[in-house]
Image: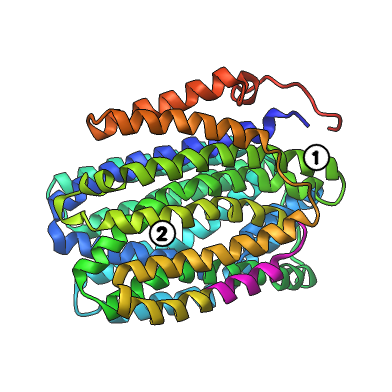
């Protein structure tokens, strides 16, 4: 195994996410300006619906197949073929859900067609994700990067072209559906030609085994998504729109930085799954390296947000000044989430997904109860406290379970992070220039101090350095 494999895959997934952010930002800006609030509202309504269609058509199959292919690549064809058939069978869950949305939208033709187009997008994306499971299981994320970015480029080009020519929201939504179908054709061809070479027969016993384990992953992710959104839903019912807006801005910012540990988890999960029961030293090495990177990211992130939270929120408009206080609270929830998400990769590789499911369910219950108690008294800050409490519970339990099997992280990286963060914080406290320039210079100062102290070596960043490990 080359030590650069995980590093390379992390870069590929990071580039994929960065490209999607940029294209999505351009698309949303044009769509919001051209379609107006009503058209943009239809677009957002349909896009949110498509995400739940995707979840119901997956039920954990992708993460299970990723893990099993990483363990035994000889079984990839059988897992893919049977997983494909299972996804076809799961249409009995996702299609009725889509039908409910179509029925709700029947009085507005544009809305109904937008829902239908995004429904197709969600279903086809589910099958595209199945192809991504093969790429990830073989640790070849470059294929996923190319296809996903190509799909987003098609959406951006044709969606913007249609909107600029005066088209309705329906044409924009059809661009999503069409691009996903093109991606599926490309993905299926790549999987067939580069990885599987032949299709495997469908075996009912294997499908039952796959679904029996995968559904635990599926329920875990469904509960996780409810956990991530329940505070906003409760605020909407218990407070006014302005309060929801203040909280939602801070929460959206936290969700953006929360993609960093997701990228790391997706990049390392196949490798951890492959060696989890065969090479404990390699598992320990991945753990130590991941913990080092997370500590060096989380520490300056928390301190930077604590110092700049008010300015960051006011950057989005003078109405969002109150968001700064809850952002200072939520950044600690994001910090513990960084580690919890990374720990989840190890626990799932060790077949501990049921434990994670019960933990996430308990944390959701804690979050709901805390919101009921705190929101009437503390408004959006109460929701922030409830989020921190439930995320803290997940972090504490995951830490206990992981530390039982792995040695604790080396604290030398934490020392480097503290010193470098101190230099960054001093700069932010002294110089009061434009926000984006301050953030850029503070990041440069932090990185420079880390390099000068030897906290990160060039070989840890650049692909191709670091040589081989003991085992292939």
- Color style of the picture: rainbow
Left or right? Give the position of 288 relative to 237: right
User: With 141 as the anchor, is 229 left or right in this view?
Assistant: left
Tags 1 and 2 in contact by the CB under 8 Å rule? no
From where the camera sits, is residue 177 visible? no
Q: Residue 409 placed where, x, y %?
A: 71, 43
| Mark 1, secondary structure of its residue | helix
Q: Position of residue 337 (x, y in %)?
A: 53, 55
**Which numbered circle lies on residue 11?**
none
Q: Is residue 326 visible?
A: yes
Q: Work out whether residue 449 or residue 285 is closer to the camera in this orientation and state it.
A: 449
Identify the residue under disc 1: 282
Q: Residues within 10 Å of mark 1 (few under 14, many from 20)?
A: some
Percent position of residue 276, x then y: 80, 50
Is the residue marked by circle 2 packed among few (<14), some (14-19), or many (20+) residues within 10 Å?
A: many
Left or right: residue 32 versus residue 183 is: left
What is the number of the mark on residue 121?
2
Give the quarter of the image for residue 238. Answer: bottom left
Q: Which residues are magenta?
A: 349-363
Q: Residue 206 placed where, x, y %?
A: 78, 68
Residue at 79 percent across and 72 percent down: it is: 205
Residue at mark 1 to residue at mark 2: CA–CA distance:
39 Å
Front position among marks 1 and 2: 1
- Main SS of the magenta segment? helix
Lower position in the chain sequence, tag 1 or tag 2: 2
Asked if the stretch drawn in magenta spans residue 351, the answer is yes
Residue 342 vertical position relative to residue 393 in the rendered view, above or below: above
Disc 2 element? helix
Image position of 134 with respect to 471: above or below = below
Q: Quadrant of the N terminus?
A: top right
């Amino acid at each position: 195994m080359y030590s650069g494999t995980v590093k390379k895959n992390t870069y590929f997934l990071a580039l994929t996410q960065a490209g999607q952010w940029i294209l999505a930002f351009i698309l949303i800006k044009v769509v919001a300006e051209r379609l107006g609030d009503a058209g943009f509202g239809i677009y957002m309504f349909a896009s949110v619906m498509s995400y739940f269609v995707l979840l119901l058509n997956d039920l954990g199959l992708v993460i299970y197949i990723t893990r099993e292919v990483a363990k035994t690549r000889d079984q990839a064809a059988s897992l893919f073929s049977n997983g494909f058939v299972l996804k076809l069978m799961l249409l009995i869950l996702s299609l009725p859900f889509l039908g409910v949305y179509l029925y709700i939208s029947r009085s507005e033709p544009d809305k109904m067609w937008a829902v239908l187009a995004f429904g197709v997008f969600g279903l086809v994306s589910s099958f595209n994700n199945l192809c991504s499971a093969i790429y990830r299981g073989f640790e070849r994320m470059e294929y996923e990067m190319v296809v996903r970015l190509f799909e987003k480029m098609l959406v951006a080009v044709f969606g913007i072209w249609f909107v600029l020519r005066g088209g309705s929201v329906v044409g924009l939504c059809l661009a999503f559906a069409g691009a996903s179908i093109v991606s599926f054709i490309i993905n299926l061809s790549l999987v067939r030609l580069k990885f599987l070479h032949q299709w495997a027969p469908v075996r009912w016993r294997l499908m039952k085994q796959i679904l029996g384990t995968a559904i635990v992953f599926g329920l875990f992710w469904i509960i996780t998504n409810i956990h991530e959104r329940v505070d906003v839903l409760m605020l909407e019912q218990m407070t006014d729109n302005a309060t929801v807006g203040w909280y939602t801005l801070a929460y959206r910012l936290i969700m953006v930085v929360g993609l960093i540990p997701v990228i790391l988890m997706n990049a390392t999960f196949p490798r951890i799954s492959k060696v989890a029961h065969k090479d404990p030293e390699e598992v320990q090495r991945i753990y130590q390296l991941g913990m080092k990177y997370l500590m060096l990211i989380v520490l300056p992130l928390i301190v930077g947000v604590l110092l700049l939270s008010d300015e960051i929120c006011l950057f989005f408009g003078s109405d969002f000044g109150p968001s700064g206080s809850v952002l200072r609270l939520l950044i600690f929830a994001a910090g513990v989430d960084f580690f919890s998400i990374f720990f989840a990769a190890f626990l799932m590789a060790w077949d501990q997904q049921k434990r994670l499911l019960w933990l996430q369910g308990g944390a959701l219950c804690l979050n709901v109860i805390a919101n009921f108690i705190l929101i009437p008294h503390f408004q959006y800050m109460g929701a922030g406290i409830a989020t921190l409490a439930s995320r803290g519970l997940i972090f504490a339990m995951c830490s206990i379970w992981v530390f039982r099997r792995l040695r604790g992280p080396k604290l030398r990286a934490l020392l480097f992070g503290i010193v470098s963060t101190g230099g960054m914080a001093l700069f932010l406290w002294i110089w009061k220039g434009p926000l984006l320039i301050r953030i850029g210079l503070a990041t440069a100062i932090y990185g420079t101090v880390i390099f000068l102290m030897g906290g990160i070596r060039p070989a840890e960043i650049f692909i191709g350095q670091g040589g081989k490990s003991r085992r292939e």
